[in-house]
Amino acid sequence: MQDTVIEVPVVMFANGSRAVTDQVAWGMRSTIRVEFSAIRLLERKTAETHTALPLRQQGRVLLVAMPNPDDTRTTEALARETGLRIRGVQAAADDIRQATKLAYDTESTSDELDNLLTHLGWKLIERGLVSLDQLAEATRVQEQSGERLGKILVSLGYINRLVLAEVLADQFHLPHVNLRQETPPLEVVRLLDPEVARRLQAVPVRWNGSQLLVAITDPTNKQIAEELRTILDVPLAFLVTSERDIDWVLDRAYRANYVEESVAGLLYRNPEESAFETFTNGQIIAGLTLVALAILGIIIAPTAFLIGLNAVVCVFYLTVSLYRLWLAYRGANINLTIDVTPEDLTQVADADLPIYTILVPLYQEFEVLPQLVRSIDSMDYPKSKLDVKLLLEENDRQTIDAAVAMRPPSYFEFVIVPDSMPRTKPKACNYGLVSARGTYTVIFDAEDRPDQDQLKKAVVAFRKAPGDVACLQAKLNYFNRNQNLLTRWFTTEYSTWFDLILPGLDNTNAPIPLGGTSNHFYTEKLRELGGWDPYNVTEDADLGIRMFKHGYRTAIIDSTTYEEANSEWRNWIRQRSRWVKGYMQTWLVHMRHPIQLLLSLGINAFASFHLTVGGTPLVFLLNPIYWTITSLWFLQKWDVIPPLFPGPVYVLSAINLIVGNFIFVYLNLAGSYRRGYHELTRFALLSPLYWFLMSLAAWKAIWQLVTKPYYWEKTIHGLAAKRRWRPFLDPIHAQKPAATDNEQQAN
């Protein structure tokens, strides 16, 4: 944009023998060109009220055109607002008003406040902070993304945020402050609501006489200054700092509040939706009542009671099997709810993309950090619009040190999660959600390798989706599927679940228990729902049900995130038992008030909830019982067994044995074909052996549900690579000074 030239006729006043500018003799008329950098130092309302127009800044002196330069009330008011000494020059009131209108109207039409790009770029070059080639590259990126030059230079790793803040302060003739060195008093920081502070990227720093000094990150945004003056209602002066400094100060001031919100926010707001209490009094009474009735039935009419119980179980088992088959059929024969085509992606301009927050919870996972960073860094999304937060547990010094040593790109941020119980993934995600800047937020696990275009697909899908869609679930699968027999089974199961079952649930308007990763959310809707339940070890499945109860839907997008399949059976059982325990927790939480749940979900979704969330653990628990009964009959010929299986019950049992097994094997075959993993189909035929491990995990889960309901049994990642972590300590971006802020945060 070319400069708009605005000149004001003035009468130059001198202090002493030298005029203010150009050595003009006392009282001689001249013209002075308005500098837009000076205009930005004064609010339009103030300029019009006092009939005063900033002309140029010379050090700590601001030259201002006014009808009466001797008006001390005006000069004092302008000094308070700008924090500068005012030097007045006389001009006609009409000339000032005309120039004021032109200057501020011209400024309002500028996206980057006229020559800001050029000024910032050349200031960096003059200081030797960037090269001409780097500035040219950043400018090309800016033309595509529409993002500010400073953020682009930071995202490219050419400067860090501290340097950017210093240069911006110099450019706008404002003081720079490093808030980690000049720590503001907590009582001053708390003068501004933390949510407002994050939104405006501003924190009060200290009192300077009658003025409150406020640190801001964007001195170009006059609306921020105006809103701060309205909210705080005291004379303000501004300093420039970095985004990370703002986050650091707010975390220091409100850490206890953030921890409490992360741990107990959902519990306080809606205790009925929290898994903090595993069994309610009503559920305990109902359970004891059923046990008592069962004992009574066995005492009074044992054979009839067991036949009836057996019949109910067989009907339920068959219903679960047929329902899964029907869901797979629906999922295989419909398009995804929100279809994103390659043409859709090509039409998305980088400039139209919003900020996207990526939350990555990490605990004792230093071995997979390098791959994680590379996976995210390779995603097709403007780096200046990525807000990546590595959620590092305070007591996990090994992972923190490894992350610091890697020096990831500057758009990665280390968020140190305070050590508190429960030490779970959802608590860490809640803590990271507090400072999320993105319009959308996604969860990735440490070992994830998402499709490179997944974020863009999610943006397009959200824009296409109906207003009630609050979450998009990407498909999950495994990159090490052929490592051994266990990984092959695991992959066939995931292929069935994410490529057939979940699309079927989506198509039938049923609640979707989310997968643990690659869930994309509207950030504000996620906050509205209270985030994740830190006391539920499958917080993802619970959130999916909770969203549906509150009138929101989950849709499936055709994008895959590849994870590491567990290749060691003990590790697999630890992981699977946690999943099953979480499904039990979710079922118990949402069944505290069955009638209310039925009314909120509707009968079809209510039934689906029981068959998926409730039915999955129950089937795993029942399998060993019926395997044992069948084995005892064939091996021992116990006479007590045949009476329990009279005609119709025997037929149902035979159908479950033959048809049920066929259905589950068929679904694994279909899932493998659907995914294109044809080499896995022969291993799907061995799925009944895999179910033995599932049942083992389920019975372990029910024991832990009673003894350790919140215990998060850690899954070990990185087994596929079989690498030591030491070689990965070499910096990934060692040539770029991008880790300064993160290093300070980690230390």
Image (tube, grey):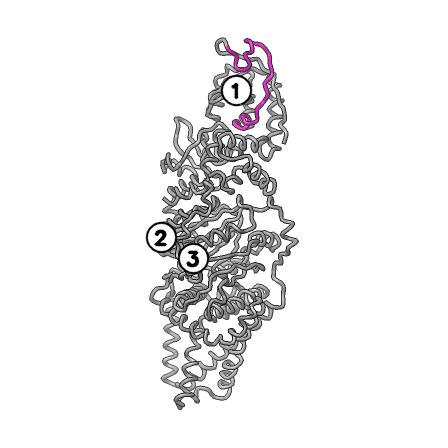
Amino acid residing under circle 1: Leu
Q: Nearer the viewer, residue 364 or 299?
A: 364
Look at the numbered disc 1 and give the secondary structure of its residue. strand
Q: Position of residue 61 (x, y in %)?
A: 48, 21
Q: Does the magenta segment cover residue 294?
A: no
N-terminal of the pair, mark 3 or mark 2, is 2
| Alpha carbon separation for disc pair 3 and 1 | 57 Å
Residue under circle 2?
A: 396
**Sooner in the amino-acid sequence: mark 1 or mark 2:** 1
Could you give the CA–CA distance between mark 1 and mark 2, rounded to whole angstroms?
55 Å
Q: Nearer the viewer, mark 3 or mark 2?
A: 2
Label 1, on which residue? 63
Quarter holding the C terminus is: top left
Between label 3 and label 1, give the one nearer the viewer: 1
Q: Position of residue 383 (x, y in %)?
A: 53, 45
Residue 469, position as x, y percentages in the image:
56, 56
The N terminus - image quarter: top right
Q: Is residue 36 magenta?
A: yes
Q: Are marks 3 and 2 in contact (CB under 8 Å)?
A: no
Query: Tag 3: residue type?
Result: Asp
Residue range in magenta is 18-43
Whole-number angstrom distance, CA of label 3 to CA of label 2? 22 Å
Q: Secondary structure at mark 2?
A: loop
Say which of marks 1 and 2 sits in front.
Answer: 2
Q: Is residue 261 visible in this depiction of the protein?
A: no
Q: Residue 110 is drawn in which quadrant?
A: top right
State yes or no: discs 1 and 2 in contact (Cβ < 8 Å): no
Q: Secondary structure at mark 3?
A: loop
Q: Amino acid at mark 2?
A: Asp
Q: Depth check: give the residue in front, 217 or 171.
A: 171
Which residue is under mark 3?
Answer: 533
